[in-house]
Amino acid sequence: MRGRMGRTVFLLSLGAVGLLALLALLAPWVAPYTPQFRGSELLARPSAAHFLGTDQQGRDILTLLLYGGRVALLVGFGATLLSMLLGIPLGLISGYKGGKVDAFVMGICEVVFSFPGILLAILLVFITQQPSVGNVVVALSATGWAGWARLVRGQVLQEKHRDYVLMARTAGAGTPRILLHHILPNLASVLLVQFSFAVGSALLAESSLSFLGLGPQNLPSWGSLLSEGAALFVCSPWMATFSGLAIFVSVLSFNVIGDRLRDRFAQPDLVSATEGGRGPGG
């Protein structure tokens, strides 16, 4: 029963992520209004005209949520991919070379880890004074890469002593070939699990920045909707409730997918490897 329940929860989470991505992609066609629409009904309850109600400016909440999903996914996937591009090569080189190279890379990682990721991201966004989508992605990646580097480095330390690496080295394969064609493909399962966790973490971090007013400006965001709705929760709980649910369901779905994938691959060191480095918000 537990296995069947786990599969059901995994499929529901996978469906939630797929639906979120589809609605975000099709937002201009499925949203009932445009984000710039301002109606005469302020703080209206959910109705046939506005399925999730309106905010204090007369904007349709459902429309804002759909367009906010685009920002959430763009930042979530963008920050994760950029962190991977920075962290994976450094982790590969650090773990394989060892010595001073390893000490230098891990030393930088320790400096990054000494600061709470979200606070460092807040500082970087605040310094730029231009909290656009691109700047938010860069700010989150500036902290997220270290988790990827440490994760990959730990895996490489184990893989580089295995027989297939020794055989490749004996056959005359150079370091780039060994890393890219032999070791990296064997890390695919670990990286896939970490990817799911990292997207959810980056999505949550973006919502946190937007809640504090440091998210992308002039764009609907779940975090900014939650911030605005919290101040009006007593008289109109709709905006805070629905935006909070969107964040909760999305982050939970990515984490459930990551947990299920980790159990599926069932590597003894995978649990400890992916804990503690789930992304910039962790």
Image: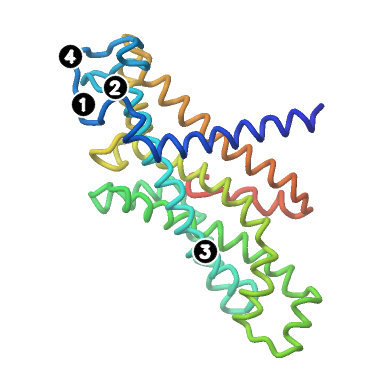
Q: Pointer 1 and pointer 3: residues touching (CB < 8 Å)?
A: no
Disc 2 crowd rating (10 Å Cα; few below 14, some 14-19, many 20+) is: many
Amino acid type, callout 1: Phe
Observer-side mark, 3 or 4, equals 4
The CA span between labels 1 and 3 is 42 Å
Residue identifier under label 2: 60
Along the polypeptide, which appears first: circle 1 or circle 2?
1
Residue 12 x %, y %: 62, 31
Along the polypeptide, which appears first: circle 1 or circle 3?
1
Question: Of helix, strand and loop, which one carries label 3?
Answer: helix
- On screen, 191 above or below 105? above
Q: Is residue 207 visible?
A: no
Residue 271 x %, y %: 71, 49
Amino acid type, callout 3: Gly
Residue identifier under label 1: 37
- On screen, 152 above or below 9? below
Residue found 56% across the figure and 63% down from its top: 149
Q: Pointer 1 and pointer 2: residues touching (CB < 8 Å)?
A: yes
Along the polypeptide, which appears first: circle 3 or circle 4?
4
Question: Of helix, strand and loop, which one carries label 4?
Answer: loop
Q: Pointer 3 and pointer 4: residues touching (CB < 8 Å)?
A: no
Which residue in the rendered view is the most extreme toward the bottom?
172
Q: Which mark is residue 87?
A: 3
Along the polypeptide, which appears first: circle 4 or circle 2?
4
The CA span between labels 4 and 2 is 11 Å
Disc 4 crowd rating (10 Å Cα; few below 14, some 14-19, many 20+) is: few
Q: Which mark is residue 266?
A: none
Disc 3 crowd rating (10 Å Cα; few below 14, some 14-19, many 20+) is: many
